[in-house]
Image (tube, helix red, strand yellow):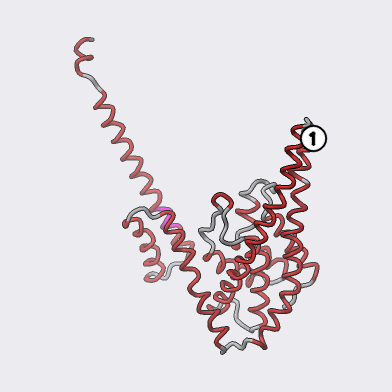
Amino acid sequence: MTISWFQAALLGLFACLSSMPGLGGTSIGNYTLGRPLVGGLVCGLILGDIKTGIICGVAMQLVYIALVTPGGTVSADVRAVSYIGIPLAMVAIHSQGLSAGSADAANLAKSMGTLVGTVGTVLFYGTATMNLVWQHIGWRAVEKGNFKQLYKVDWLYPWVSHIVFSFIPTLIMCKLGATAVTAMKDALPMDGIPMKTLFTVGALLPCVGIAILLKQIVDKVTDFIPFFVGFTLAASLGLNLVSCAVISLIFAVLFYELEMAKNVRANAAAADDDFDDDDEEDI
């Protein structure tokens, strides 16, 4: 598999769109197009191999399933993971002759995505730094009462930042990196220590993403029970993800109804405590 300049340009365009809040809000840009799960589909359509693209996207999504940017602090950049890491991982899988559905292919995709995601933090902070220039222009326009200038500050000038730190890096890294990844086949044989190390690290990376997710949502030991139930269903009954999701939805509804019942009882008890018998006798 090779990546043409046109395909690399399309990947660069989606890298821009996935990091721009102006594209229908952050929920559509960063938190939808930028997610590896969605980026895998887009990369598969652009490169003509939807199956491999989706498999790479799913593998990388496990690593970054709990990735958030609190206060602008990021440990990895999803635009780089989705639109640089996934295309290069697809090229690596094809060049190594791996089956798209094999465990080695998924582990290789995770390793490459993590490497690119870490490098992508430079792109994130570079974009944020250049946007400060447009912000300064906006404040000067407000001081002068030129409010029409704010349209350019909000919708036009940020494209310059994203072209410099999203489009161009993605274009170059996807086009030239594909050649380097293909050459990796001869430099790093499948039975060598470097490739085995990549596979091993890739197999462990999802544990990091799941651990971060659990740290955010688990408050007490009993919160682990729903997760154990899911693993048990998948391992013992052989259920797929869709079936497990439906069963999880049933449990979620039951937990919701129980919590609502507790709230009703608590409110009723509070109302009884506020009732004053003396006032009733006076009436």
Instruction: Note whether residue 41 is visible.
Output: no
- Percent across and percent down for residue 204 are 48, 73
Q: Is residue 174 left or right of residue 189?
A: right
**Vertically, is 174 above or below 162?**
below
Q: Which residues are magenta?
A: 246-250
Figure quadrant of residue 46: bottom right
Measuring 55% from the left and 87% from the top, which residue is drawn there?
193
* Element class at badge 1: loop
Q: Is residue 99 left or right of residue 16?
A: left
Measuring 72% from the left and 76% from the top, which residue is drawn there?
178
Neighbourhood count class around disc 1 (C-alpha, 10 Å): few under 14, some 14–19, many 20 upward: few
The residue to which callout 1 is attached is 148
Q: Determine if the magenta segment contains residue 223.
A: no
**Vertically, is 110 above or below 243?**
below
Quadrant where the C terminus is found in the figure: top left
Instruction: Note whether residue 103 is visible.
Output: yes
**Vertically, is 118 above or below 201?**
above
Which of 233 and 32 lies nearest the eye of the viewer? Answer: 32
- Percent across and percent down for residue 248 are 42, 56
- Percent across and percent down for residue 49 are 68, 72
**Vertically, is 87 above or below 17?**
below
Figure quadrant of residue 260: top left
Q: Which SS type dominates the magenta stretch? A: helix
- Percent across and percent down for residue 242 are 49, 62
Q: Is residue 22 left or right of residue 210?
A: right
Quadrant where the N terminus is found in the figure: bottom right
Measuring 32% from the left and 57% from the top, which residue is drawn there?
221
Figure quadrant of residue 94: bottom right
Measuring 44% from the left and 62% from the top, which residue is drawn there?
244
- Amino acid under label 1? Lys
